[in-house]
Image (spheres, rainbow, N blue to C red):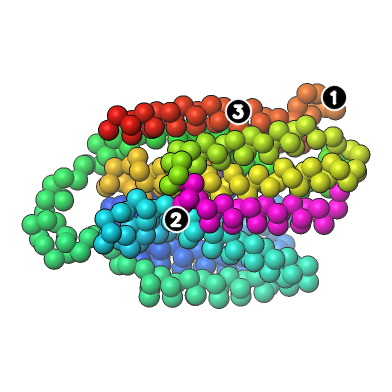
Amino acid sequence: MAFLATTTFVFSPFWAFINDKLRSPRLLLSFATVLQGMSFFSFLLIPRYLGDYTFYFVLLVAFLINCFNAALYPVTDKLVLSELCDSQTESNNKQDGKKLYGRQRLFGTFGDASTKTLMAILIQGFFYERLFVGVGITMTIFISFILLGFPNNQNSEKEKTDPEANNKKLRRELDTFEAFKTLLCNKNLQMFMIISIANGISRSIGSHYFDAYVEDPIKGLNGSKLWVSIAGWSSCVCEVFFFLISRNIAEKFGISRLLLFAQISMLTRMTTHSLNIIGTGNTVNLVLACFGELFKGISFGCMMAGGVLVASKEAPKELQTTAQGLFSGIYNGLSPAVAGVIGWILLKNSEGSFLYGYTGCFKIAMLLSIISVIMAFVLDKKITKHECSS
């Protein structure tokens, strides 16, 4: 798990940087999607009789899938932001266009929930071979949308029609070293990335271990899969709701406040789980766990909407997709990898330890959430002060 998450961390910024240089998202997304689909189908070619070597082949295929999948999130996020900005060009209010990102991102939540339901039905019926057919169909549909709906390049209309404007733009572009130096030396972006790591690890600890925490009769709450399902759907509903209202929050309180709200929600979630009583099978404790998961949806909805907007706002124009790639790589790659290692260490602890079992993992996540709340508060004050002075 940690190995595959690290793959995402490495390749998300790589693909994002390639897109910033090529400025041809249609080509890059088509390339990545086709190779991801081909990698998935290669599971069918793995022999089942090679013992440990079979596992290594599976790991190799999973590595290839994650490698090409890492291109999808940062490039599509940048495309969505660009299209939303273009839709607001006539009213000269591009920032309002960016704030609509959350309402577009909620379709990903619907897709995730429906896909998990479909996969559960197929796996429950042991129709594993149909998963490959499903992936092939999905890839074909996605590529069709890429070829028909996405722009071929990200140059503005003026740059397409005015050679002099295009030449001026090229002269303004930073070289690779200077661009990365500008990106990585941005103090606000540095703080945001640290917040993303802390929040991402906390989120991933919950994602990795919540199901087992609910069902485990000794280290957990001794609940059934029904409670896991209830918690998952309640979180999904909250996530969709906060994606819908993310624009309203950003307009009324600012993007940095949206980010702060995400950290407070994560702290509430992890505090609830770390203080819950394990091993009783009590319905009250299970209800409390479901209540805590409500804040998962709130935190993720606000973090994704706010995070994409902050990365776009703070990055140089020439490295907009690269900034999205860094955020995606840290939040969806590095953080799950670190969370997996933390969980592996803590779940080996002997009973009676302060950091025993799943609640020990949640206590670490609670500590990280406290750090992210403090840093988000400082970042909010810094950004607010800068906006007031300007």
Foreground label between 1 and 3: 3
| Residue at (43% x, 73% y) in the render | 145
Q: Amino acid at mark 1?
A: Gly
Q: Which residue is mark 1?
A: 352
Image quarter for residue 264? top right
Label 3 with label 2: CB-CB less than 8 Å? no
- In this rendered view, identify the residue nearer to me: 355 or 338: 355
Look at the image and give the residue range highlighted in magenta.
223-250
Instruction: Measure the C-alpha gap from mark 1 to mark 3.
Output: 24 Å
Q: Earlier in the sequence, mark 1 or mark 2?
A: 2
Q: Amino acid at mark 3?
A: Ile
Residue 133 appears in the figure: yes
From the viewer's perspective, tell me whether residue 350 is left or right of residue 301: right
The correct choice, above or below, for 145 with respect to 331 in the image is below
Foreground label between 1 and 2: 2
| Mark 1 surroundings: few (<14), some (14-19) or many (≥20) residues within 10 A | few
Q: Residue 147 in magenta?
A: no
Label of residue 101 in the image: 2
Q: Which residue is mark 3?
A: 370
- In this rendered view, identify the residue nearer to me: 387 or 260: 387
